[in-house]
Image: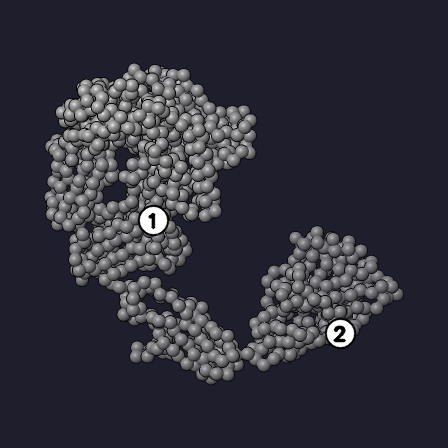
Amino acid sequence: MKQTLLFRLLCCLLLAHGAGAWAQAPLTTSPYTQNFDLLPATGTNEKTTLPTGWDFAEVGTAANTTYTANNGALNSGNTYSYGADGSTDRALGGLLSGSVTPTLGASFTNNTSATITSLTLTYQGETWRVGGTARSDRLDFQYSTSATSLTTTDGWLDVDALDYSNPPSATVIGGGVATPIHTATLTATISNLNIAPNATFWIRWTDFNAAGADDGMAIDDFSLSFNAGTPSPLLSVTPASLAFDRQAINTNSALKSYTITGSSLTADVTATAPAGFALSKSNAPAAVFTSTLTFTPAELATAQTVYVRFTPTTGGATSGAITHTSTGAEAKSVAVSGTGIDPNNNLFSFDVCPSGSTSFDTWTAVSVTGPQTWGCTTFGRAGNDPTNRASAPNGLQINGFASGASVPNEDWLISPAFDLSTFQFPIFSFWSRVAFSGAALRLRVSTNYSGTGSPTAAGVTWTDLNADFPGSGSDVWTLTPDIDLTRFKAPNVYIAFVYTSGPELGAARWTLDDLRLQNANAPAAPVLLLNPASLAFGYQAINASAQQTLTATFRNLTGPVTITSSDPAFQLSKNGTTAFSNSLTYTVEEANFTSTTLTVRFTPTLTARSYTSTLTASTTGASNVTVAVSGNTYAPDNTLDVANWNIEWFGSTAQAPANDDLQQTNVQTILTNLNADVYGLTEVVDTARLGAVVRQLPGSFKYKVAEFGSNAPDNNDPDYASAQKLVFVYRTGVVSNPTFSGLLRCPNNATTCPQYNAWSSGRFPYLMEADITINGQTKRINFVLIHAKANENTSVADAQEAYDRRKVGADALKAELDTRFGSGNVIILGDFNDDLDQTVASGVNTTATSFSAFTTDVANYTALTLPLSQTGQRSTVDFGDVIDHVVVSSELNTFYLPSTAQLRTDLAALIPNYANTTSDHYPVLTRFAFGYVTASSSAQKANAQLDIYPNPATSKVQLRLPAAAGQQVRMQVMSADGRAVAQAAGSLEQVNQRLNQQLSSLSEGVYILRITSPGQTYVKRFVKQ
């Protein structure tokens, strides 16, 4: 029956009552006694009426937190106050039944200053009702020094000597009695204890399940004697920490205080403060503060107040602990912290950054609209990281993106009031970092803000400071130095950062750290900024013009700014309509502390050539700033134009962009304006939508979709429809005889081969082999479209695994291409998910790109888009790197038109809110022209004998061809579009002389030199500058 009841008890655990926290009975002097005579003699009462420290717990379907007065007449399971009707002589007991199992007990706290080593317990066990005959019933005694309630499962120890049992009865006694039916006095000592001061222990009696109906049993006249050792010296301090506000160096802070108490001390107590903090027993104006204080045991018999002063001597955060020591006592400490500020070099590092606060290092967050606000983040700037990508506590951050949308917000982060009236040259600087696309921060200053309330209230004026913030999505810590506030030298100056977000603006994540205000003894250095760092015009017809704009920012100027173009094909204008010239000049008066837009106009005059120029901005006291500008006049009708573009979950109903119809319209617009011959598209989900786009493209196009994708080994897989797929779109007038296949796929479309994991669970490279005809010439080209494994940032291990998987895939692809197309025309294009100058993966064990197999084999492969990375361009909206690339074999590189690789960021301007409605990637365009037939391997060896020096050339070249010495040869020079522009016959020296005579008349561009001797033809490409 006991096992049955135990099972029933466990099943009812969720119905248990009385397992919560309960006040303990304090043990101060021995013995502790309890006779329960204050228990109610009538009615039903809550357990809160029990003596302090005493408790009961009931388990079962009828369990509750009340107990009832009873003389033994009641037969229902419950907890009872037993005694004669109306009598004040009470006992605490219970009656076990099928619906209730009561447990009685108490908890005690050692409130002495010594360790309790033994307990002696005495009580009277009583029987008030006998429910069955010829058997005993029992209360089992247990104790625990680790329990937290009567229902704690583990840690209970039995003491059988304190179990109360009644003798068997010949009759059932259940009509109620005036005195107990049976009593027994139990006593026992529990030794070898170690109950420290302030520690708690529990005792309890559990009701044995006797045969038949149980007996009503109780405890009474309880006594607890304890043996405590010699009291240990004790120290106590409160509070445990003191945090001081920012304090100017070499000045005294306002006082803070704490209290110290002691007991059983045998020696004096010494309080010692760390550097920068001092102590005193008095807060009087003339009180003396020292680094140490001494308290006698007599003083600490009552609580003593200690006053603390913070006097920093250096700027920055300071922390430490005030220690308190006395012989035999456990040392106690009070943590202290504060930030010293140098008024002439005031740094706000946010090292102490309370979560949930609206004030950070005395900067205040004020929300004008929207639910998102400035707050603390542990992803602050790691000052010792040379890459400026690592994070360390703490910084301030805001992100208006929530619940999958850009939420409308306007949030201000406002400085404390600064008195700049005494500054010689007030200079402000800060570090910032931005991820994802969205509006730039604004930096503003006010001399009439009150320091409280709305910064946009009527009458409050703010002036914009033309600070240079990092580019959207760059996600790198960037220093903005030398913001001169001399114009605002006043007693109460406030500086504010203003964040905005919304459906049209997007929602960037901005982080700030290490803000600094300095009183400099010299003016800030002039600042020149031109953005973007490069302009690519692409193709432009001769004698016609195209325009693009630059933003120029000027600060702290001491003289005029001049911006010049190195090539007259690129001219500059302040207003974009008139006065275009090779040089612009801005006076200090018109330009200082402003950002202005200038227009660059490209007007080429020569056909079939590449144009490059450098725009240079210069002013006194500042380093020159340059912008690389390029364009070309290679007519698209005579070139092969190849585009690759990640269209971000195109047509997916489950992923952003949310409006699939709008995305389809926008993709149609971008592809039409790209006007390429071959498109390599990644992240295509809805192929029917893509088909509708292709059919609307000007001209005749076809498309082919890869029959596999991530987690979809073939097009019959249920995940295929929703998977990101690779697609080729091609112009039928240029591309013929195409064949399509997947590279590195597992045999029989399995999912277990190594490359399945390397290529993002089945997103294998997609190959199109096709004949390409341009300008009357046809060549076989192998297009390899890839979408490599993405990066992972959830942990260092995940980041390394993703990098390793991508590198394994790239290495295998390189080996496959070398084997199959060792001398063929190969172009690898698509989303590499890595840059080619160095990896974008953070936390991995290398900085090398995961595609190093290609970038290190410079003899056989050329990364056409690598220069775009090296000039600081980006191929995605949200991150400041190029991860969409084009790599070609050395054979195809022969036909590449120099400097035509272009990130078509300009096309995003055609689409409102491009990043949120179309794609988070920009298209990449590369261009090729066929000037001659690709050489065979034997011809390549012959070609290697022909040397042109220098190359690129300007006015003269030297031809070297030892194999043709003494022979008559024929020379022919062809432009990149296949036109013969020079020819001669004679000895090598004679044709060399003829070439130099004609070289100066050639336009800048790429040319093909062909030397034909008896029995051999030699071909070499050179560039005329």
x 33%, y 55%: residue: 383
> What crowding class fits label 1: few (fewer than 14 Cα within 10 Å), some (14-19), or many (20 or more)?
few
Q: Nearer the viewer, residue 357 or 971?
A: 971
Q: Quadrant of residue 965?
A: top left
Q: Is residue 360 above or below residue 754?
A: below
x 72%, y 55%: residue: 9
Measure how far apart labels 1 and 2 are at the Cα level: 76 Å
Extreme residue in the front direction: 966
Q: Nearer the viewer, residue 390 or 98?
A: 390
**Quadrant of the snapshot with the C terminus:** top left
Judging by the rendered image, the residue that carries numbered circle 2 is 186
Numbered mark located on residue 564 in the image:
none
Q: Nearer the viewer, residue 401 or 221?
A: 401
Q: Secondary structure at mark 2?
A: strand
x 68%, y 75%: residue: 191
Judging by the rendered image, the residue that carries numbered circle 1 is 387
> What crowding class fits label 2: few (fewer than 14 Cα within 10 Å), some (14-19), or many (20 or more)?
some
Q: Upstream in the sequence, badge 1 or badge 2?
A: 2
Image-based side of 817 in relation to 931, left or right: right
- Residue 942 lies, in percent from the top left, at 31, 25
Q: Secondary structure at mark 1?
A: loop
Q: Nearer the viewer, residue 151 or 427?
A: 427
